Image: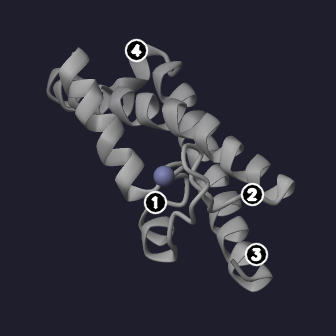
Amino acid sequence: MRTREINSFKTLLIDQRAEVINRLHAFRSETLAPVGERGDEGDRATSELDLSRAVRDQERANMLLPKIDRALHRISEGNYGLCEMCDEPIGIARLKARPVATLCIACKEEQEQQERIFA
Ligand SMILES: [Zn+2]
């Protein structure tokens, strides 16, 4: 991969990381808000819905953060974009869709198949 391409992925990952951290902070201040500030009965029902959505968002963010860090680490080591299993390039298109991908499509499919077998 060209340096220019690596740099654009790096920017993308750093942006994504900041966004995830923002979301985690927003979640904390939301859930830590005193109950009295959450309004009346009707509002509370809405905020409980919001809360469960926020919890899902937070779980996703919590899982994504180490993946972003790992990708950034791989950039600094110079092996970003290479499959962790077969060392083949993961492919720009796949990385654009999923910058934190660590496996090429073939290895990913193989892994998913094994997960299905052992599930
Ligand atoms: Zn592979």
For the residue carrying disc 2, how many other residues have a C-alpha within 10 Å: few (<14), some (14-19), or many (20+)? some
What residue is rendered at 30% in x and 46% in y?
A: 109
Question: Callout 1: helix, strand or loop?
Answer: loop
* Residues at marks 2 and 4, CA–CA distance in whole angstroms: 48 Å
Question: Callout 3: helix, strand or loop?
Answer: helix
Residues marked 4 and 1 touching at CB (< 8 Å)? no
* Residues at marks 4 and 1, CA–CA distance in whole angstroms: 38 Å
Residue receiving disc 4: 35
For the residue carrying disc 3, how many other residues have a C-alpha within 10 Å: few (<14), some (14-19), or many (20+)? few
Residues marked 2 and 4 touching at CB (< 8 Å)? no
Residue 34 lies, in percent from the top left, at 48, 16
Q: Is residue 94 visible?
A: yes
Question: Callout 2: helix, strand or loop?
Answer: loop
Image disc number at residue 98 = 1
Q: Is residue 47 visible?
A: no
For the residue carrying disc 4, how many other residues have a C-alpha within 10 Å: few (<14), some (14-19), or many (20+)? few
* Residues at marks 4 and 3, CA–CA distance in whole angstroms: 45 Å
Residue receiving disc 2: 79
Front: mark 1 or 2: 2
Residue 113 lies, in percent from the top left, at 24, 35
* Residues at marks 3 and 2, CA–CA distance in whole angstroms: 13 Å
Front: mark 4 or 1: 1
Q: Decide which of tag 4 and tag 1 comes sooner along the chain.
A: 4
Residue receiving disc 3: 7
Q: Decide which of tag 1 and tag 2 comes sooner along the chain.
A: 2
